[in-house]
Amino acid sequence: MTNIGIVGVGCISGIYLENITNLYRDIRVIGVCDLVRERAENAVKQYNIPKIYNDMHELFADPEVDLVLNITRPYEHFEVSKAALLAGKHVYSEKPLGASWEEGRELVRIAEEKGLWIGGAPDTYLGAGIQTCRKLLDEGAIGDVVGATAFMPGHGPESWHPDPEFFYKYGGGPMMDMGPYYVTALINLLGGVKRIGGMTSIPFPKRVATCKEHNGEVIEVEVPTSYYGVLEFDSGVIASLLTSFDIWGAKLPIIEIYGSKGTLRVPDPNCFGGPVILHTPEKGDEEIPLAFAYKENSRALGLAEMASAIEHGRSPRASWKQTLHVLEILTGFERASKAGQYLDLTTTYERTEPMDPTLPVGVL
């Protein structure tokens, strides 16, 4: 049994706590902390958690904590993960790994120096939808892959999120917020990326919140809110990627992969399930049954897999080898845009083993 200590008990913590408590058999939450103590107290009561810490440093000092789950805000990921690593703890972080390329590299340096693992979200690619897509690609269902597209158009979270300002500050924006799901899905389906290009913009430098908690407040935008990127994979496949908080409405596919024999429509990478649609000239559109477990919201799947990997002495699927490559891509689009040229990546990536469909649900 791996003991998890959680730093940050905000909006997304509920699904983590629910799944760790009721779904995954080999991990348990031993303690939590949050800057708003009431949140931690509520979690302790609701999920019968043994410990509540005054701050993260008290959590890191607890010898019973094996692995730290960092679900703080994006701009806080670096300091929290760094402190946990320096205290000798493995770390699983919500996306992104860091708010900048430099932060990500420093965290990996510390982890390697101390012989620890760091990795993190998203873990949706381990779910039934994208794992089924990978199986189809590996079996040649669409022949040789010739290209791909991915789109995430929207008009920002200020209408619904209870605290939307951080989406428009350092570490925020549509690429850092939603891009991790799309890029992680793409590299798990198509392999590593060797070169990228991109252009970014800020069409609306001021945003007005309409959520009930901050209705009418003006948010000063400090990061790009539209990213138009192109990716060249190691295989030579070219893909395009759009993420935007500036689009009121669009009719675009989420992710499509184009092959010499057909097209694969990949489900929303922010979710674990389907639908998976295979289009061929012979049959047209055909919904493919999901061939793997974890169709529902299974967050903490990557955390449970990491804990199992560490216990059994193997490399976790959602380790820094993946999250650092993703971070270089996410941050690289803006760097490429500012430089006005393509960016050759310094990290490499090889797809990890697919999920094992024969294992019982909850066992990794």
Image (cartoon, grey):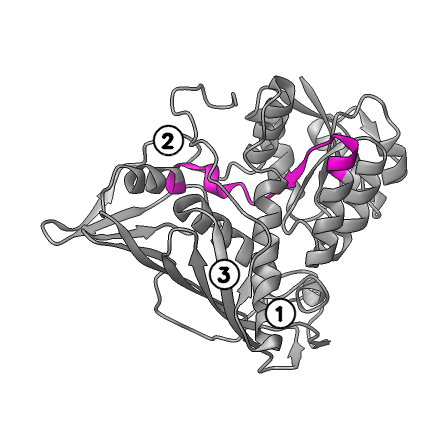
- Tag 1: residue type? Arg
In the foreground, 18 or 273:
273
In the foreground, 85 or 38:
85
- How far apart marks 1 and 3 lie (CA) works out to 12 Å
Q: Say left or right for 239 vs 312.
A: left
Q: Can I make out residue 220 in this image? A: yes
Q: In this picture, which residue range is highlighted in magenta?
A: 111-130
Q: Which mark is residue 292?
A: 2
- Tag 3: residue type? Arg
Query: How far from the left and from the top, in percent, is residue 103?
Result: 74, 54
In the foreground, 356 or 293:
356
Helix or strand or loop: what does disc 3 sit on? strand
**Quarter where residue 250 is shown:** bottom left
Helix or strand or loop: what does disc 2 sit on? loop
Q: Residue at x 51, y 23 (%)?
A: 362
Q: Say left or right for 160 vs 193.
A: right
Query: Please, is residue 96 above or below residue 175 in the view?
Result: above
- How far apart marks 2 and 3 lie (CA) works out to 32 Å
Helix or strand or loop: what does disc 1 sit on? helix
Which one is earlier in the sequence, the residue at label 1 or at label 2? 2
Q: Say left or right for 21 vs 33.
A: left
Q: Which mark is residue 358?
A: none
Name the residue carrying label 3: 195
Q: Marks 3 and 1: in contact by CB < 8 Å? A: no
